[in-house]
Image (tube, coloured by chain):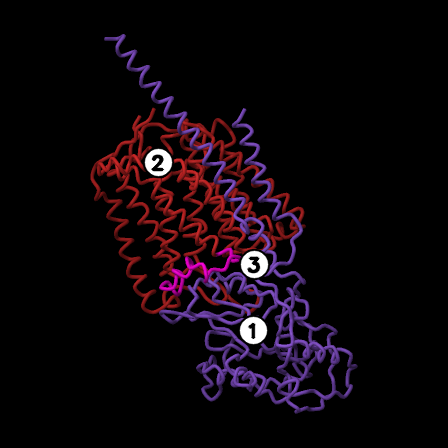
């Protein structure tokens, strides 16, 4: 009777654990982050990027990262993709004859690859030892090697495949863009933005960048527009004719939003930016983890129940053994 | 009543020497890994940050090592005393399985000197699923050794210690049936954050439950698998009757697993994906076919009570469920950006074989030296 009840209860326990998964989940991050005046980011406008790669070199200079050459052209610093030596990259989109900029058919375009500094970062949620943390003010997702154990769960948890690992080092670190926070401290701009000649990589407070992108999305094709260069408040501007923008500000809502955001005339998916839902996988994972472990109540209850029954069963078994032993002794006496 | 005995006999058998050779090769491969870095011996990359050292040695290996967990559940929680003879052998296999999964993690993580950070309360991140797995597995390895300790202390006639261990056993056994429930489900939760990198045939919020269930039936199947081998190898007598009972339990849990999985796929509208016959679909169907064949085989009493089919059925279930876990961590995983591929390098394979060899060698030594088996 008792055992049946216990069996029932433990099934209920399993069901409770299971329903944590089925119930609608509240977004819930390590520490909820809200955009403030101090939150900084980059607006990358693919329509005005000329693919000169100055930002790639600027990034390497700023972070003292070594040159990488993949095609033997020694004269150029030409990394193939993001690696532990390359935190920023310009990728090209080409189609057909690749004649017209910002066109999908027979056109070409560029896209910048770097850390997007998510508002609900997967890497921060994944990291077991808090080696990746989101700065309370700037929102920059920073890496602290002293805390890192090198498990690479951040690489699995990043929806944009950003953190890179030093595979050929005997004692490796994770490498990723940290928005040049070491330069920001000195009042300078990130290496990629201070070198971008067209304003395609624009640094500034996230709130201002969002206003800027809203204005650009209102532009009609060939409207003249004064584009700020380097940063939102640098004072430098250039006038370009607006391209035919896709009416979407990538990074405003994707997976909870990002601080590095994108505008483009070519669909984002073709540029390697996946169409993501608003809800971040990090928040789903966190909610699941918190549901079961936040108070340790469920594990404690399970442990308590198990202890009680195991102890009871073991005592009963001992008594049974004793009884059997005595019985066999008695039998032995009789035989004798 | 039961009483375990040490089997005795020659330690340096051909099997033992063969295993030692594999271990030697592993040591060489690890030498390269620790001096030159992970890239020198492995095919892991920024696209596939985890290889077989995680997918096989930890994710599949720890499920293979759930025999101790399910036997403790059966005997101590559900009070089925007659299965007592299966407890210690299963416990021993679990102890080595988990210990070596832990060793594999230490080979795999890049910054092993910093691993202590996992135990510093001001460093750890409570929302990290990896943290839960790491702490829980560490604790479980310790608990498994404590659970096995009476076999060691009684061998060396440490009577006081043996008494203490026997008195506190109920608590450690309780911890030992709680921890696997936690980290085996967490091994599933772990891949939720991978989002769309994991193919929709496997990516689901049910991952924790699926991993817990697979750990359970894999544990029972492993008891059958190991029991079949050792009863022959060490001439322990016919254990088919008792093992087929365990197979029956595996069948029940596996049936629930398959039902839940199919229902989940229907809910997520994955039927078209399942039968599209691309790589993902084929490996999914293989996984299902292996598990279902094993299930049907063991569900039929005639087959279940024949030593040969009992063994084959358990192997099929183990293969299918290993493939399930492999799929979640490797085969159905693909990075979002770029052309990446992964196949384990010779170096990675040597290390994994070496770890299995350590397990077999240590197991054969322990059963001869310590009281593990109950002779009929």
Q: Residue visible at 29% across and 59% down?
A: B27
Q: Position of residue B1 (x, y in %)?
A: 34, 24
Colour in which chain A is drawn = purple
Colour in which chain B is drawn = red
Q: Residue visible at 58% across and 78% down?
A: A91
Q: Residue visible at 54% across and 78% down?
A: A88
Which residue does the numbered mark 2 point to in the structure image?
A: B88
Say left or right for A212 vs A4. Answer: right
Between marks 2 and 1, how big is the CA–CA gap?
52 Å
Q: Position of residue A110 (x, y in %)?
A: 62, 79
Q: Same chain for marks 1 and 3?
A: no
**Chain of the residue under label 3:** B
Q: Same chain for marks 2 and 3?
A: yes
Which residue does the numbered mark 1 point to in the structure image?
A: A140
Q: Quadrant of residue A262?
A: bottom right
Q: Position of residue A300 (x, y in %)?
A: 50, 43
**Chain of the residue under label 1:** A
Residue B193: image tag = 3
Between marks 2 and 3, how big is the CA–CA gap?
37 Å
Check disc 2 and report its element: helix, strand or loop. Answer: helix
Between marks 1 and 3, how big is the CA–CA gap?
20 Å
Q: Quadrant of residue A165?
A: bottom left
The crowding category of the residue bearing disc 3, from other C-alpha atoms within 10 Å (few below 14, some 14 to 19, many at least 20), is many
State which tag comes first along the sequence, 2 or 3: 2
């Amino acid at each position: 009777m008792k055992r049946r009840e216990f069996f029932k209860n433990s099934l209920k326990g399993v069901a409770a654990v299971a329903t944590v998964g089925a119930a609608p989940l509240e977004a819930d991050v390590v520490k909820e982050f809200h955009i403030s005046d101090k939150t900084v980011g980059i607006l990358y406008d693919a329509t005005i990027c000329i693919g000169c790669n100055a930002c790639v070199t600027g990034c390497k200079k700023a972070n003292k990262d070594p040159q990488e050459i993949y095609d033997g052209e020694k004269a150029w610093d030409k990394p193939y993709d993001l690696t532990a030596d390359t935190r920023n990259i310009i990728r090209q989109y080409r189609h057909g004859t690749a004649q017209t900029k910002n066109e999908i058919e027979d056109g070409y375009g560029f896209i910048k690859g770097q850390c997007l500094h998510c508002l609900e970062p997967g890497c921060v949620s994944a990291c077991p030892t808090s080696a990746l943390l989101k700065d309370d003010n700037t929102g920059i997702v920073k890496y602290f090697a002293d805390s890192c154990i090198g498990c690479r769960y951040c690489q699995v948890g990043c929806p944009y495949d950003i953190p890179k690992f030093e595979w050929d080092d005997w004692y490796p670190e994770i490498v990723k863009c940290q928005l040049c926070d070491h330069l920001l401290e000195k009042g300078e701009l990130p290496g990629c933005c201070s070198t971008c000649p067209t304003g395609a990589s624009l640094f500034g407070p996230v709130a201002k960048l969002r206003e800027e992108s809203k204005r650009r999305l209102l532009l009609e094709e060939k409207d003249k527009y004064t584009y700020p260069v380097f940063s939102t408040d640098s004072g430098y501007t250039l006038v370009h004719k607006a391209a035919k923008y896709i009416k979407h500000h990538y990074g405003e809502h994707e997976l909870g939003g990002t601080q590095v955001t994108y505008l483009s005339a070519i669909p984002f998916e073709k540029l390697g930016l996946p169409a993501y839902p608003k809800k971040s996988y990090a928040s789903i994972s966190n909610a699941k983890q918190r549901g079961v472990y936040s108070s340790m109540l469920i594990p404690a209850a399970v442990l308590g129940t198990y202890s009680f029954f195991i102890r009871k069963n073991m005592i009963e078994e001992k008594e049974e053994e004793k009884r059997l032993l005595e019985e066999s002794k008695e039998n032995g006496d009789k035989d004798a | 009543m039961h009483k375990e005995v040490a089997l005795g006999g020659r330690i340096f058998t051909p099997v033992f020497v063969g295993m030692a050779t594999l271990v030697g090769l592993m040591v060489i491969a690890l030498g390269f890994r620790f001096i030159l870095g992970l890239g020198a011996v492995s095919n892991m990359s920024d696209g596939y940050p985890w290889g077989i050292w995680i997918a096989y040695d930890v994710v599949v290996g720890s499920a293979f090592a759930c025999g101790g967990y399910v036997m403790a559940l059966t005997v101590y929680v559900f009070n089925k005393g007659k299965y007592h003879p299966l407890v210690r052998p299963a416990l021993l296999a679990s102890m080595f399985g988990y210990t070596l999964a832990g060793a594999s993690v230490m080979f795999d993580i890049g910054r092993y000197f910093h691993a202590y950070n996992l135990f510093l309360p001001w460093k750890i991140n409570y929302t990290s699923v990896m943290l839960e797995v790491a702490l829980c597995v560490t604790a479980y390895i310790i608990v498994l050794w404590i659970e096995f300790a009476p076999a060691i202390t009684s061998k060396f006639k440490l009577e006081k210690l043996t008494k203490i261990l026997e008195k506190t056993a109920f608590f450690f056994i309780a911890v030992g049936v709680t921890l696997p429930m936690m980290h085996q489900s967490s091994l599933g939760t772990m891949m939720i954050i991978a989002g769309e990198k994991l193919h929709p045939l496997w990516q689901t919020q049910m991952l924790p439950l699926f991993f817990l269930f697979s750990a359970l039936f894999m544990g029972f199947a492993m008891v059958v698998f190991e029991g079949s081998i050792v009863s022959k190898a060490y001439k322990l007598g016919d254990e088919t009757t008792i093992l087929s009972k365990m197979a029956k339990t595996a069948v029940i849990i596996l049936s629930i697993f398959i039902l839940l999985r199919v229902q989940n796929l229907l809910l997520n509208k994955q039927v078209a994906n399942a039968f599209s016959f691309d790589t993902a679909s084929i490996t999914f169907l293989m996984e299902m076919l292996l598990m279902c064949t094993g299930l049907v085989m063991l569900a039929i009493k005639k087959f279940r009570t024949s030593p040969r089919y009992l063994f084959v059925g358990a192997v099929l279930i183990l293969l299918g469920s290993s493939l399930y876990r492999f799929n979640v961590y490797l085969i159905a995983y693909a990075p979002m950006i770029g052309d990446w591929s992964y196949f384990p390098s010779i170096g990675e394979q040597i290390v994994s074989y070496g770890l299995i060899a350590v397990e077999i060698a240590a197991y054969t030594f322990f059963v001869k030296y310590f009281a593990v088996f109950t002779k009929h």
